[in-house]
Image: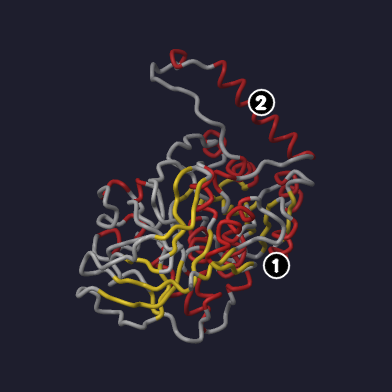
Amino acid sequence: MKAVVWHGVGDIRLDDVPDPTIQDPTDAIVEITASAICGTDLHFVRGTMAGMVEGTILGHEALGVVREVGPGVRNLRTGDRVVVPSTVACGTCSYCRAGYYAQCDNANPNGPAAGTCFFGGPQTTGPVDGLQAQYARIPFANVGPVWLPEEVGDDAAIMLSDIYPTAWFGARLAEVGDGDTVLVLGAGPVGQFAVTSAFQQGAGRVLVVDGIPSRLDQARSRGAEAIDFNAEDPVAVVQELTGGIGVDRVIDAVGVDAQRPKSGPAAEAAQEQADQFEQERSQVAPEQDPHGHTWVPGDAPSQSLQWAVQAVAKAGSIGIIGVYPPQMTSFPTGAAMNKNLTVKMGNCNHRRYIPHLLELVRTGAIDPSTVLTQVDDMPSVLEAYETFDQRQTGWTKVALDPSP
């Protein structure tokens, strides 16, 4: 079969690989009818998320048709159409039973302390071969895949595999409630759904920050107030729009690869912050710690995290769903503490939220396919990766059709 395979930083290929087979009683083999490219996949291609194993099939978003099930799968039949959650979970450990599927004790082959297991990720997450392929082996298929009704089309259903649940989870982490003013950092696919999720969870106003006009236009069509960081200072605009108070909640939907402003007041402010950080780091040595502890200055906090802490009101809350690697150690802790902020973060517990969101889609409460901007076949997938990576205008979410 054909699959998108990681060979190294900047080196992905469309390879012929062996068809997957049943390995455990709770496995299923799913013929993939739609997959997608996610910003997280780009982290692996760019190298900002380390630890990928050569030969790993990429992709963690998919839906398809069940072609084979192991003897331990009681809920699926051959021919069933399903959406596959991006994270893998057993469904029986204490974490899964409490709804924390992303912290399953049994799914990650590296052990309970290893944390989230998801398709197409680095060694620390498995690795488990991903879903940008014609067929995929789905572990714990007795729990993971969710049956899809006929009235929910592929373009809508593919959004339920990862980005819509992740955005919903981000609004929950940020503690969005009735009447809140919410700031969404990043207007990519997850950011678009974060706008929608914030409104669905009661927000009165939603502001969104990005630097790509087409993405900001999409956010406006969802009711958001757009802020272009290439034309204005986002923090100053937030202060102006909130009477100098700041927003109640922030959702960071962009993560480690957040772009810095290219010009204007925001760029000047970002450069000033970076220079100040480097100056402070150069002046502090481990032996100067007054408590005798070893302390080595780390990397500067990402631009989005700095904006999040600066833009939120005192006693506000921040939900972080943008991806950050384990090597990312810096956060504006002092500023956050002095504002009494609540900060929550993590990988989405997809299986917890998909059934509810699927019902919203089935009943017509939302059409998630409106985020989809491109659909490509497998032969053109490498070109799609390159264009998506460049954040070209008009490219928000790319789906793949793996059929021959």
Q: Position of residue 251 (x, y in %)?
A: 57, 54
- Point out residue 377 in the picture as x, y percentages from the top left corner: 56, 68
Name the quadrant containing residue 369: bottom right
- The amino acid type, in three-letter code, at marker 2 is Asp
The structure residue drawn at horizontal position 32% and vertical position 82%, both measured from the top left corner, is 78
Picture coordinates of residue 61, whole percent (x, y): 46, 64
Q: Residues within 10 Å of mark 2 (few under 14, many from 20)?
A: few
Circle 1 residue? 223
Where 144 sits versus 246, above or below?
Answer: below
What percent of the width, then of the height, locates residue 111?
Answer: 25, 48
| Front-most of residues 321 and 237 | 321
Foreground tag (2 vs 1): 2
Task: Classify residue 27 as left or right of residue 357.
Answer: left
In this image, 219 relative to 28: left or right? right
| Front position in the image: 241 or 370 | 370
State whether residue 342 appears in this view: no
Residue reaching furthest to the top: 287
Residue 275: numbered disc? 2
- Residue 268, numbered label: none
Name the quadrant of the N terminus: bottom left
User: Secondary structure under badge 1?
Assistant: loop
Numbered disc 2: secondary structure: helix
What residue do we see at 59% from left, 67% from top? 376
Q: How is the image coloured?
A: secondary structure
Can the viewer see residue 133 in this picture?
Answer: yes
Give the Cα separation between the discs numbered 2 and 1: 36 Å
Label 1 CA crowd tier, 10 Å (few <14, some 14–19, many 20+): some
